[in-house]
Image: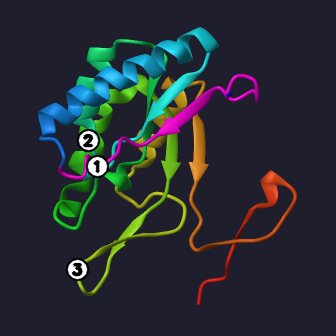
Amino acid sequence: FASVMGCAMIGTETWSGDGFLNDEEAINVLIRNLKKVVSYAEKMGVMVGMEPVAGHICKDFVTARRILDEIDSPNLVIIFDPVNVITKDNYQRQSEIINEAFKLCANEIACIHAKDFIIEKNGEKKDESDGFDDDFSEEKQKSIQEDNIQLFTTEQKFPVQQKESNSFTDCWEPQSAS
């Protein structure tokens, strides 16, 4: 229904697999099923945005590149959210991870999900409010603007609170931080 509503892209994460399948089996199942979705999206004139997430089947940008290559459709694109592939175990390498994402997937990045993160005193990673930190350099931001004319962005505000409303667009509002 995305094209009927005037949406150019639908976005998805790729499920964790919950340990039912090994990594290779899970990737193959994802590719087989995502091919069907992307094929339909092509017919409807809609892009499918895939968002890599650590712990999911598409866990990093190397896996994303493999899936992009195997499906081989201009209608399969990347939702770039580097915070989703940065973990408490690899956050010291965040610049390397971001550079790898651009090296592997720059031409397919169609949406940027802008948020940041912190490592709490207990060592856990916590997603933070909107924006990118200093490791997401002005140079990369300029490159995105120059290379991707049709780029969507979405910002994440924390925390949010659902409120009652009759309007779809009024369903969420930022809640003041305590």
**Contact between labelled residues 1 and 2, with CB atoms less than 8 Å apart:** yes
Name the residue carrying label 1: 16
**Element under label 1?**
loop
Q: Is residue 21 left or right of residue 132?
A: left
Q: For mark 3, does the 10 Å Cα neighbourhood hold few (<14), some (14 to 19), or many (20 or more) residues?
A: few
Question: Farthest front residue?
Answer: 20
Question: Farthest bottom residue?
Answer: 178
| Residue under the point 30% across and 30% down | 30
Where are the magenta residues, as a range? 2-19
- The numbered dot on residue 57 is 2
| Residue 135 point in image, percent of width and height | 34, 56
Q: Quadrant of the N terminus?
A: top right
| Residue under the point 43% across and 17% down | 36
Question: Farthest top residue?
Answer: 43
Q: For mark 2, does the 10 Å Cα neighbourhood hold few (<14), some (14 to 19), or many (20 or more) residues?
A: many
Name the residue carrying label 3: 123
| Residue 67 point in image, percent of width and height | 28, 25
The type of colouring in the image is rainbow
